[in-house]
Amino acid sequence: MSFAVTRLLILQQLVLMIPKGLKETVRTVLFPPREPLAAPVEWLDAPPVRRQERQPLVSVVIPCYNYGRFLDEAIASVRAQTLRDVEIIVVDDGSTDGVTHEVLGTLEETGDVILVRQENQGAPAARNAGLRLATGLYVCCLDADDTMEPTYLEKCVLLMEGNAGVSLAYSWLRVTGSEERIWRSESLDLDRLRYYNHVSISAVFRREAGLSGGGFCAAMREGYEDWEFWLRLGAEGHRGEVIPEPLVNYRRHPAAFMNRARKRHAELFDHIYRRNREVFEDAGVRRTVRSGYRDRPVVDPFANLDDRRQYDQDVPMVVLVLSGDAPPEPAERITRTLGDGASLCLVRAGKAAGSGRSPARADGYTLGHILAADFHGPFIRHLAMTRPVRAVLWLDPGPEPVGWDELSTLAEKPLLGVVTLSGEAQPRGPGLRLVLRPDGSLDGAESLVAALRA
């Protein structure tokens, strides 16, 4: 084993020995935050790839080996996504237990997922089998014992559709089970990726990027194959960005594969090193990759997302638009006012509030996490076009509410209104006006409820 590998392993082993609650602090000291990336901008008139008729936008590949007791929950979380234009591919990697056979048999009978059966070859080979069958523009590999929050796929796709210079997107993880915490993953950084894996296995990536990289290394069936995959994609110039929200639920339990892989850390890492030696040893290669990043915003970032059939149309929706630093408390009062008659979608426009270290609401949209500021107004218009939006409200919006101009161009506009705090001046513009009183009451709500019932 070379001195370079030994040096990396010593540092990694020291980090592995640190109590979990201190690891992020230690990593912050060892790897101070970089300055925000200022990549050159190259505008695109259209997305690099347009979705074909009946082509799914995302393929979710779920490898399964004796995890039938978790599989239904994983699939249910995919079916509950806000973005419904998804194909589900389950790859049975030679499961042997009865529960898994029963669950897979039911899936085979219903026929609403693509089921692949193969002899046991390990998780990377199972993912590759699903990747070869996938027809979506994007692919997400979800472990059978994990789940995703309803907005996860949509937010990842929005990030990449709005910036074609990004090839993979992912979020923070909510660790559950034998351990409870938020794992704050980071945007792909080749310098850091040599030391530890900070990219989620459930990252959503462009299918052509995964295929061009040859998929996951099937020889690494004992673990860390995702670490090697992201490192290889990164070395090819593919850029990965993180959404600072806990949108994937990672189940930690004694049988979890990562727990077993860590016991063979030195052996598995040596394999990663030998397959990617140039990235580890040549700082010039890493600098060249980073300098080659480009922000490639698309003039119409919703071209692949503007089909109403991609979204649930059953429950009427009210959109509440907040500025970057506005408090979310009025949302709770409006939700109570709406009752079961409509859902409330919270949209935070403008610069994202805070430093991104506090989790945002997983059921809403913090646009600063996924889209450039120029796209915030068009996104609100996109919501009104594709979802059953009955009203759009702005909380103390100022003279130019984000999205107001874009909504004014719609032939069929939703009801537009403002919510002001007691004593605040009432802005001009929208006709519906709601006032939130100090006691929590909401004046003017009768007009909103009446409009929803009409």
Image: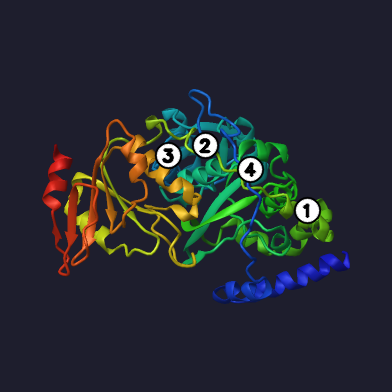
- Given residues 395 and 333, the one toward you in this image is 395
Depth check, mark 1 against mark 4: the one in front is 4
| Mark 3 or mark 1, earlier in chain | 3
User: As displayed, is residue 202 above or below residue 439?
Assistant: above
Is 7 positioned to the left or the right of 60 in the image?
A: right
For mark 4, what is the residue?
A: 42
Secondary structure state at the residue bearing disc 3: loop
- Given residues 211 and 326, the one toward you in this image is 326
Q: Residues within 10 Å of mark 3 (few under 14, many from 20)?
A: many
Q: CA distance from mark 2 to mark 3?
A: 9 Å
Q: Which mark is residue 58?
A: 2
For mark 3, what is the residue?
A: 83
Q: CA distance from mark 3 to mark 4?
A: 28 Å
Q: Percent from the top left, x then y, of residue 392?
A: 28, 46
Q: Amino acid at mark 3?
A: Leu
Q: Amino acid at mark 2?
A: Val
Q: Amino acid at mark 1?
A: Thr
Depth check, mark 4 against mark 2: the one in front is 4
Depth check, mark 3 against mark 1: the one in front is 1
Q: Amino acid at mark 4?
A: Glu
Q: Which mark is residue 288?
A: 1
- Quadrant in the picture for the N terminus: bottom right
